[in-house]
Image (tube, helix red, strand yellow):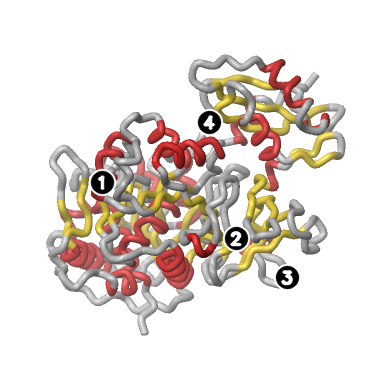
């Protein structure tokens, strides 16, 4: 049996290949049928086959979001090669590192980037550089157009490599997480069942496709269910709301839900046809969770995952399985193990904060060309150290407290930023906050908070500190609070605390 992920996705295509698979939301909408996906991926796979690439060759892709870019991903799987998606915001120094580390045989970039990308790629030994833009232009499609629209998918085992996803690299250089065909398919199949995918579902796809959430969770979900996608090249809240009556599923990061709530058109009537709203990639504020329910009548389903593992936990979809609880990421997925251990590796008791470790068929093979780092990140009994700190309550809900690298040790006491942030976010005038530790001559690290004001509010930093003293232990109270217009975030909406730490690292230098 061929375990190539493409075969599983292709098998789920509906019987009538002339049904609409993807509809774009451009000024002049385009409609792609399932037959278009079949033919387009075949032609692209035949182009890749014609290049006579070595086994396991990497295909690096840094393009804008388009249906053709999704077809390219599927074609790489179909050809049995390894897909390497790269954030479209990466600049030349970052791309130079990825090319040097992954040694791709093929690089696909935008036409406007061809000059500098090709210089970097060719000098590093990459043999082929193609271009692809968001309007179906570029050399990739021109070259593929002459190839046959029939293709037999490459034979692959479940354990063979399908993709390499580079981590965000908030500490040191990015690491390439190696994901197999089996890793990706097992996760997609579990989520299909758990989230109740059904005939007639339509997904609004408004996420980028260089990341786990948009490329795997959203795209695989729709494809494995044979569901139509309404395709937005970029998120625009009014465009999403306008299409809600034709859709049933939406997936977004918390920032997108905040922006949807900023639109008066987001009402219960607008969401009446929707079945499921999913949030992930960054923590969802409890205020956002509650406001969305009050406005729409829908309870957002929050889940938790990583580049190295795909999805690990999820709040329940069906009421029979429990309630969707704000501030939690739900239960471990079927077949996935999640445990919490202390610094010595001993199991924590229920509700006790510790280090989250996981295992399961979705957990990656290791880091590309980093055997020592891979060994370091797995325990002796085979559990992956996520680097996240959290707890599991008596009902089995997982609560993420923060990243272990974000743990602050001040005066010998452990301070968990998420705890302070949750208190700050409930204080008058505060929309959201980020708590960091910075060097301090007496305490080792000092707690510092950076807050964003609610619209029309002007919170006073000194008053916030005084208010916190009544709510949390003194060693947790920030020594300084800064009010800013916005927090720095990456493309998936995660707050970049490393930038905040760098900005304030000399605050207590004297």
Q: Secondary structure at mark 3?
A: loop
Do callouts 3 and 4 mark residues in contact (Cβ within 8 Å)? no
**Position of 175 compared to 45: left or right?**
right
Mark 4 → mark 2, Cα distance in angstroms: 29 Å
Which sits earlier in the primary sequence, circle 1 or circle 4? Answer: 1
Q: Quadrant of residue 15?
A: bottom left
Secondary structure at badge 2 equals: loop
x, y (%) of residue 455? 49, 20
Against 428, is 72 above or below?
below
Camera-near label (3 vs 2) is: 3
Nearer to the camera, 455 or 321: 321
Return the disc, 1 or 2, that comes first in the chain's sequence.
Answer: 1
Crowd tier of the residue under label 4, counting other residues whose Cα lies within 10 Å: few below 14, some 14–19, many 20 or above = some
Which residue is denoted by mark 1 in the rendering? 245
Q: CA–CA distance between discs 1 and 2?
A: 47 Å
Label 2: few (<14), some or many (≥20) within 10 Å?
Answer: few
Q: Residues within 10 Å of mark 1 (few under 14, many from 20)?
A: some
> How many residues crowd mark 3 within 10 Å: few (<14), some (14–19), many (20+)?
few
Answer whether residue 91 is visible to the viewer in this image: no
Find residue 370 and name its label. 2
Q: Residue at x 63, y 62 (%)?
A: 374
- Taking 316 as reference, is 209 left or right? left
Q: Give the distance between the C-alpha atoms of the residues marked 3 and 4, in whole angstroms.
A: 37 Å
Mark 4 lies on residue = 488
Q: Earlier in the sequence, mark 4 or mark 2?
A: 2
- Of tags 1 and 2, the one toward the viewer is 1
Closer-to-camera residue (359/41): 359
Quadrant for the N terminus, please.
Answer: bottom left
Question: Where in the figure is residue 243, as x and y percent of width and height?
Answer: 25, 43
The local secondary structure at tag 1 comes to: helix
- The image quarter in which residue 364 lies: bottom right
**What residue did someone put label 3 on?**
380
């Amino acid at each position: 049996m061929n375990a190539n992920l493409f075969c599983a996705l292709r098998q789920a295509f509906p019987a009538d290949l002339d049904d609409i698979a993807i509809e774009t939301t451009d000024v002049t909408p385009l409609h792609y049928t399932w037959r278009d996906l079949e033919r387009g991926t075949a032609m692209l796979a035949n182009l890749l086959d014609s290049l006579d690439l070595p086994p396991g060759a990497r295909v690096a892709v840094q393009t804008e979001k388009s249906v053709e870019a999704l077809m390219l991903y599927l074609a790489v799987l179909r050809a049995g090669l390894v897909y390497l998606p790269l954030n479209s915001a990466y600049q030349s120094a970052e791309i130079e590192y990825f090319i040097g580390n992954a040694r791709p045989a093929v690089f696909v970039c935008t036409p406007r980037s061809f000059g500098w990308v090709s210089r970097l790629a060719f000098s590093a030994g990459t043999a082929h550089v193609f271009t692809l833009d968001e309007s179906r232009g570029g050399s990739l499609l021109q070259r593929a157009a002459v190839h046959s629209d029939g293709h037999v998918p490459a034979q692959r085992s479940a354990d063979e490599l399908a993709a390499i996803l580079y981590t965000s690299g908030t500490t040191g250089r990015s690491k390439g997480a190696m994901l197999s065909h089996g890793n990706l398919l097992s996760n997609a199949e579990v989520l299909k069942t758990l989230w109740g995918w059904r005939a007639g579902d339509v997904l609004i796809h408004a996420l980028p496709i260089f990341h786990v959430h948009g490329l795997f969770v959203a795209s695989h979900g729709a494809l494995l269910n044979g569901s139509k996608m309404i395709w937005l090249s970029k998120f625009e809240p009014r465009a999403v709301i306008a299409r809600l009556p034709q859709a049933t599923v939406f997936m977004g990061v918390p920032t997108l839900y905040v922006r949807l709530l900023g639109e008066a058109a987001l009402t219960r009537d607008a969401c009446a046809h929707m079945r499921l709203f999913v949030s992930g990639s960054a923590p969802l504020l409890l205020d956002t969770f509650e406001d969305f329910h009050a406005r729409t009548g829908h309870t957002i389903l929050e889940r938790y995952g990583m580049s190295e593992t795909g999805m690990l936990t999820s709040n329940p979809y069906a009421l029979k399985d429990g309630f969707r609880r704000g501030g939690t990421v739900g239960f471990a997925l079927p077949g996935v193990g999640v445990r919490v251990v202390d610094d010595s590796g001993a199991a924590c008791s229920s509700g006790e904060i510790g280090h989250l470790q996981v295992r399961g068929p979705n957990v990656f093979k290791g880091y590309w060309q980093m055997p020592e780092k891979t060994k370091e990140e797995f325990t002796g009994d085979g559990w992956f150290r996520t680097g996240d700190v959290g707890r599991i309550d008596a009902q089995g809900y997982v609560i993420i407290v923060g990243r272990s690298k974000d743990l602050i040790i001040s005066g010998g006491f452990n301070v968990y930023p998420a705890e302070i942030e949750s208190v700050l976010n409930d204080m008058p005038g505060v929309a959201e906050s980020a708590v960091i530790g910075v060097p301090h001559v007496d305490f080792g690290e000092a707690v510092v908070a950076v807050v964003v004001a609610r619209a029309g509010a002007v919170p006073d930093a000194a008053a916030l500190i005084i208010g916190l003293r009544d709510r949390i232990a003194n060693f947790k109270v920030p020594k300084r609070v800064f009010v800013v217009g916005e927090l720095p975030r990456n493309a998936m909406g995660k707050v970049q605390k490393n930038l905040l730490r760098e900005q304030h690292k000399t605050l207590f230098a004297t």
